[in-house]
Amino acid sequence: MKSRQTTKQDILEAINEFSDRVDERFNRIEGDIVGIKSTMVTKNELKTEFAKFETRMVSKDYLDQKLSSLKGDLVEAIRGENKKLTATVNLLAAKKVFTKDEATKVLSLEPVV
């Protein structure tokens, strides 16, 4: 069996091959880092976006006020309808379309607000 002695050229080729592989890995890692950096947001950008969000955000007080206003509008509308119902039932009772008991029954079904 023939023994092979390692030459300087063999060592240089091995080092060169190793260095090429390390370079490939570093280049891949560097590419990944560049990709990550391109998607990162700076602290100032985040502050700016949050400030924009805050200006568009609805506060609890604002919501409470709007809901209260809506409730008031609904109560007013229902009371108006109650008045119409009462007037209609009374008119029909006066024309003897409803008996007094029937009119009372219908009016007792009136929505309560």
Image: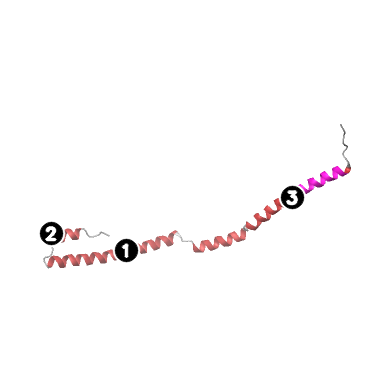
**Residue at 19% in and 58% down:** 108
- State left or right for residue 95 relative to residue 3: left
Residue 110: percent from left, percent from top: 22, 60
| Amino acid on which disc 1 is placed | Leu
**Please, what secondary structure does the residue beneath circle 2 have?**
helix
Asked if the stretch drawn in magenta spans residue 18, the answer is yes
Q: Which residue is mark 3?
A: 24
Question: Looking at the rendering, which quadrant does residue 73 occupy?
Answer: bottom left
**Residue at 85% in and 42% down:** 11
**Residue at 36% in and 63% down:** 70
* Looking at the image, residue 90 lies above or below residue 11: below
What is the magenta range? 9-21
Q: Check if mark 3's residue and mark 1's residue have beta carbons within 8 Å.
A: no
* Looking at the image, residue 31 lies above or below residue 72: above
- State left or right for residue 74 relative to residue 96: right
**Please, what secondary structure does the residue beneath circle 3 have?**
helix
Asked if the stretch drawn in magenta spans residue 98, the answer is no
Question: Looking at the rendering, which quadrant does residue 43 occupy?
Answer: bottom right
Instruction: Kindly report which numbered mark, 3 or 2, lies closer to the viewer in this rendering.
Output: 3
| Amino acid on which disc 3 is placed | Glu
Q: Which residue is mark 1?
A: 74
Q: Report the disc number at residue 28.
A: none
Q: Report the disc number at residue 101.
A: 2
| Amino acid on which disc 2 is placed | Asp
Using a 10 Å C-alpha cutoff, classify the residue at mark 1 as few (fewer than 14 neighbours), some (14 to 19) or many (20 or more). Answer: few
**Please, what secondary structure does the residue beneath circle 1 have?**
helix
Principal SS element in the magenta part?
helix
Residue 112: percent from left, percent from top: 25, 59
